[in-house]
Amino acid sequence: MNILVTGGTGYIASHTAVKLLAAGHQLVLVDNLANSNIAVLDRIALLSGQKPHFYQADIGNYAALSAIFTAHQIDAVIHFAGLKAVGESAQKPLHYYRENVAGSLQLLEVMQEFAVKSLIFSSSATVYGDPRELPLTEQSPIQPQSVYGRTKWMVEQIIADHCSADPSFSAVCLRYFNPVGAHPSGLMGEDPNGIPNNLLPFISQVAIGRREQLSVFGNDYPTADGTGVRDYIHVQDLAEGHRLALKLTHTPGCHRFNLGTGSGVSVLEMVDAFRAVSGHPVPLIICPRRTGDVAACYADAAKAQHELGWQAQLNLTDMVADTWRWQQLNPQGYQTPPAKLKEKL
Ligand code: NAD
Ligand code: UD1
């Protein structure tokens, strides 16, 4: 298929791109580079032996999008582009609604104009908010607690309404749990700007000595060791989930799937796993809870297994080992000079 990938140079999209190229798909990547580095394209080319088309463009830009749809015969769109920082979304709600909601609307309108009838959308487990029941199924109550979470739920609703109005349109909303890990080559991974908000990138920067210690946000949750429990999923498994979701390209309607492993890992368990794999110390201090955090969140991913034939294959050690390899090979993320990388490979 000819697939347009929005947010194509981002963390999850870049791993998905390598997987899709290996499966024989043709890709057109579009990204405004708001949160990614152009160097990702060379890494994709190195890993796949192919350089996909790339446009530096904003999905909110009608002229740019329609020029791309005119230049390429697109069969399906995988829509990763968006902003994802929960804290920032509270400070800049209008910006988040414009980028995530209005941007998605613009994309859907251009797809409609060019009669492109198939979409995969990056949603998030954050739409469930504070779980009333665990594990979370696709039927669990929706109650997003942040502006970011509300943008994801609004887009899901817009997509569902569009599917109702156009019975030939097929959409798959993938609700990711906590994506972590990196490509096993160590050539691609997560490269957060500034201080990482998320647990694994933070631990990894502590282990390599870029940060002094990890702040553990609360050890008084009603969990086995008192720290927060999450369903971490390897980005390579997520990438495979997108490949399999393309099966539904010709099945009209709005399909929703949880993509998670189904098991929870606590903050302290993650720290222990990192110490064991890296052999480095991870100093930590216990701090108050972070506002908006929930005690535990993990998926029931049975629907993805039954309907897509998808199941997470990689375990916690894989997640940590691949993150660590990426961190060691790219101490400055994608800013690491290629010469230094070659020395280490
Ligand atoms: P990312 O920031 O690495 O990737 C998003 C990409 O979209 C970036 O390259 C960014 O430059 C681009 N982008 C942002 N706004 C754009 C716009 N208006 N036009 C064009 N490009 C734009 O993030 P990621 O972790 O790869 O996440 C991908 C998607 O998955 C996002 O929609 C995110 O909300 C969703 N998601 C991520 C997580 C996670 O923890 N990483 C969890 C659940 C859902
Ligand atoms: C966060 C977002 C969520 C988003 C997800 C994507 C919040 C409130 N939620 O989820 O909307 O979909 O990222 O991956 O920001 N922790 C520490 N110290 C740290 C960082 C994290 O103890 O420095 C703890 C947290 O309290 C939590 C666990 O580690 O218990 C995981 O945190 P994180 O990686 O930020 O993910 P989520 O909070 O699940």
Image (cartoon, grey):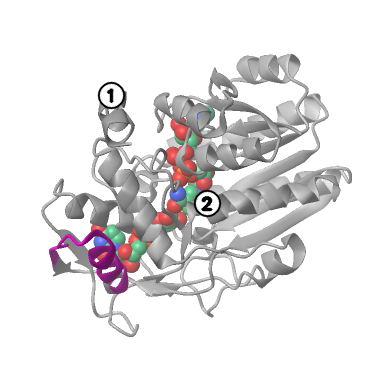
Q: Which residues are magenta?
A: 269-284
Residue wearing tag 1: 339
Q: Is any part of residue 300 visible from this angle?
A: yes
| Residue 50 occupies quadrant | top right
Circle 2 — which element? helix
* Ligand 2: image quarter: bottom left
Q: Position of residue 34 (x, y in %)?
A: 41, 29
Q: Give how far across and how far down residue 290 sits, in percent.
A: 27, 63
Is 282 inside the magenta-drawn segment? yes
Q: Is residue 61 left or right of residue 272?
A: right
Quadrant where the N terminus sits is top right
Q: Secondary structure at mark 1?
A: helix
319 versus 326 height, above or below: below
At 38% across and 65% down in the image, what residue appears?
Answer: 317
Whether residue 122 is in magenta: the answer is no
The location of residue 225, given as percent across then percent down, is 28, 82
Q: In the figure, is residue 111 to the left or right of 127?
A: right
Q: Mark 1 and mark 2: span between their CA atoms?
A: 26 Å
